[in-house]
Image (tube, rainbow, N blue to C red):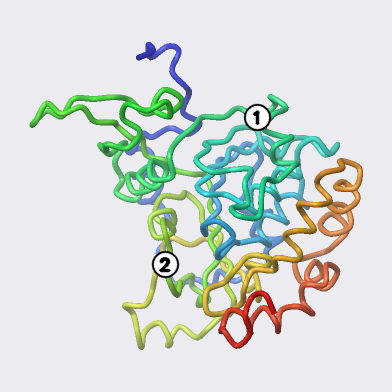
Amino acid sequence: MGSAADSPPLFASPASQPIREHFRGKNRSLTDKVMSVADAVRQWVRDGDYVCIGGFGVNRLPTAVCHEILRQGKQGLSFAGHTATHDFQILCAGNLLGRGQTLKRVDAAYIVGLEARGLSPHARRVMESGTVECVEWTNYALAVRFKAAAMGVPFLPSHTMLGTDTQQQSAAKEITCPFTRERLMAIPALYPDVAAIHVHEADRFGNGRIRGVNVADSDLARAAKRLIMTCERLVPTEEFRRDPTSTTIPFFCVDAVCEVPYGSYPGNMAYEYFSDEEHLRTWLRVEENLDEFKRFIDEMIYQTKDFTEYLHRCGGFARLPKLRRQELMIDSPSS
């Protein structure tokens, strides 16, 4: 094992007491938090922040927030790559294209790949450039980091990574259990400065519902110092009061609520719409040539005012009825 001096760094402090003080001071009143995505990113995402994006793979992505981070030119961000696919692909477009450096540090479990679709040429270009500092983890290790943060503790013990090469590339520490003398890994808490999570339904105060699996988003919502929630639709608070057990994310975790219909596009939204495989292939194709990709990003993100305009400009809005039929299994994905 390497010494503490040469072990990989932590990009965010796992200290729990300062965070507990921060959460103690958060406003828990029922205030109207509805705003535009542009206003939410302007108010709650700052240069140098540690940013976490909810969802998993291309499922339930807060795509509009990722676009707006680019559009507003946020710089020097740290990022958690917890099975990050199209979200990471978008944020990497803020590097090496002449608009500064959106990403500076990455805690990586799964990045660059878009699962069975292949590797993102530009995300690979960015990570191979040597301009982004990277520390490696397993998917489960990052989930444990969010769990520790949600619990308000500085670390949790786990067997994950123990005895692997990933252990050596991570910032976790090997410890001995004081009760059993077993070898364990101390997985540090991850308290992001800001997170963005897309949900199916939300009310004006920030109560949110996720249908289907939420992976680590319940913990992420409780770990983040600031949280932007985008939703497919706003619903009255009475809907949450009628069925309070369906609330996945409670209002007191949330700082901004943004209604963004089709907000996971081109990703999948369970029970709403299938992923737009055609558009994801377009991203992968145009990324192969840097000049073509720069023109694509300029046209689709920097020259659009918001996510709705992006949907129309890329042709996604016209394809959404078919994507909805595919998700509801009215059509097959190959039809």
**Image point (42%, 59%), residue name:** 215
Task: Say which residue appears at 38% left-offset and 41% top-offset.
Answer: 141
Residue 304, image x and y in percent? 85, 62
Provide residue 23's location: percent of width, then percent of height.
38, 50
Q: Position of residue 50 (x, y in %)?
A: 55, 41
Q: Residue furthest left?
A: 179
* Residue on which the image places disc 2: 213
Most foreground residue, 333 or 54? 333
Q: Earlier in the sequence, mark 1 or mark 2?
A: 1
How many numbered discs sit on the rendered protein? 2
Crowding near the residue tagged with mark 2, few <14, some 14–19, many ≥20 C-alpha atoms within 10 Å: few
Residue found 75% across the figure and 66% down from its top = 278
Q: Is residue 7 above or below residue 335?
A: above
Kind of residue at disc 1: Val
Task: Write down the residue under mark 1.
Answer: 132
Q: CA distance from mark 1 to mark 2?
A: 31 Å
Judge the density around disc 1: few (<14), some (14-19), many (≥20) Cα neighbours within 10 Å: some
SS state under label 1? loop
Which quadrant, please, contains the N terminus?
Answer: top left
Image side of residue 170 versus residue 65, left or right: left
Which of 312/306 is in front? 312
What's the amino acid at mark 2? Val
Residue at 77% x, 72% y: name it.
316
